[in-house]
Amino acid sequence: MTDATTLLVGPFNRVEGDLEIRLEVREGRVSAAYANSPLFRGFESILQGKSPIDALTITPRICGICSISQSMAAAQALADLAGKTPSPEGAKVAQLLHMIENASDHLMHFNMFFMPDFARAVYADRPWWDQVLTRFTAAKGSALKRAVEARAGLMHVTGLLGGKWPHTLAIQPGGVTRAPSVRDKVRISADLAAFRAYLEEVVFGGPLEQFVELATIAQLSGWTGGDVALFLAISDDLALDSSGCGAKRYLSFGAYPGPNGPLFKRGTLVDGTSGQLVPEQIVEEITHSWMLGQDAHPSRGMTRPDEDMREDAYSWCKAPRLAGETFETGALARQAIDGHPLAVELAAEGSVRARVIGRLLELARTQIEMERLLASIDPRAAFMRHVRIPDDGEGVGMVEAARGALGHWVRVEGGVITSYQIIAPTTWNFSPRDGRGVPGPVEAALVGAEVRDGEETPVSVQHIVRSFDPCMVCTVH
């Protein structure tokens, strides 16, 4: 391939929403990438002028696969606005609902979004291809049927506790609307046991606790069970441990907040060094976004689309920065910031392999923690406390969706919302360049990816993009 070639990749299949990436290619490698979120949706504008409580109904509809995450962030923002906290047992149930959604998301990403790419004919000469073809061919693979069945069983819990999914209204600033009974706990326990059995038989091929105990990449390389082992064989063959390596700056808002704080820690990890996350240092930059206004902290920001789509911009997505720097977010970031030794070592690698294993590690840890959390819920306790939403004030809700850090910032004046700003995980990961020209996380990770002659959608680019598990409908909400 000749130098200075421009390649436009998109739309991507098996990606939630619309995504387009412009690649500059030199000597068969990506030299620069520009990620475009081409669909503006306007939820932040829709919320203006509404009653604050309407956020609980509107924001979950930003996304059909992480709606509980949006519910959690909105409920937290309203509770913060009111200066209240949910009842302890209500917070536990909300935690459990959120964990089930994220675990379901991780499972579907591995089985239906990521692994089917290896069934492409370009890999027909690889020793593992026949096995992938049997298990992960889109709509036909044996792994997909089992995954869908296991997910349906797990999501039964959201029906019991949330009434429906997506877009449940069960999660409120004061707790949850459904108080589980002793009988409910028995039924949920059975659902969790069935999901564990599936994970141990099919995905991991061994006890979850043994996988969670892996502390190094060397130990991980010796794992021989389930679809995890198949992925590791593919990764070794295709060198996915050196593909899509990012800037190795990670952040987490802290996952699954409960009565005693988040289950997985809040913080940052930069070049292996842990740090505190200071939310006041977050700024949404718009230099290369089709937005009007100025760079600002989300509590003072605005969403005014530039209908003229000025030429120096290329995405509807804003560019969130923490203390002026780009940060990657997601399961790998959460597990590394929480201090899991394998995740810390993988975060130092920062590759496609690292992100996928980080997600699988979190799936195993989340299953174990869901079982512990369920056992601690007391059906005799109160699951809701009264919370009066004030007519004036500000609040913030910061949670972790499956794909990473999600924040809601609300301002209320005279009983109506005057500002509602959201930064979603994919807004962090797929942000455009900032005012200094620094590329966003996925843009940086794509530099160096191989592009073969004649490839319109390079497979290496597909793997890197999917390792971030983008949700573009959330990105520009």
Image (cartoon, rainbow, N blue to C red):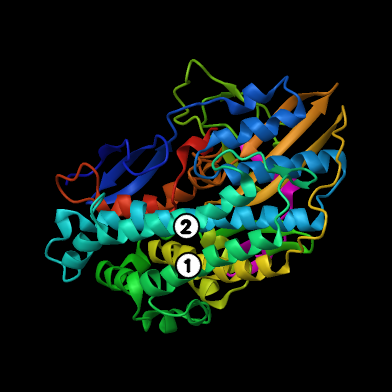
Q: Is residue 267 visible?
A: no
Q: Secondary structure at mark 2?
A: helix
As drawn, 15 above or below 317: below
Q: Position of residue 136 (x, y in %)?
A: 26, 58
- Specify the quadrant of the image occupied by residue 6: top left
* Left or right relative to 263: residue 313: left
As drawn, 273 above or below 466: below
Q: Is residue 345 visible?
A: yes
x 14%, y 54%: residue: 121
Badge 1 amino acid = Ala
Q: Position of residue 237 (x, y in %)?
A: 25, 71
Residue 125 inside the magenta-drawn segment: no
Q: Main secondary structure of the magenta part?
A: strand
- Crowd rating for badge 1 (residues with CA inside 10 Å; few <14, some 14–19, many 20+): some
As drawn, 52 above or below 212: above
Looking at the image, tell me whether mark 1 or mark 2 is earlier in sequence order.
2
Residue at the spot of label 2: 153
- Specify the quadrant of the image occupied by residue 7: top left
Q: Residue furthest left?
A: 125
x 25%, y 62%: residue: 135
Residue at the spot of label 1: 194
Q: CA distance from mark 1 to mark 2?
A: 8 Å
As drawn, 293 above or below 444: above
Residue 350 or residue 438, whichever sits in front: 350
- Crowd rating for badge 2 (residues with CA inside 10 Å; few <14, some 14–19, many 20+): some
x 27%, y 68%: residue: 234
Q: Position of residue 369 (x, y in %)?
A: 62, 69
* Magenta part of the chain: 264-284
* Image quarter (top left, top right, bottom left or bottom right) of the C terminus: top right
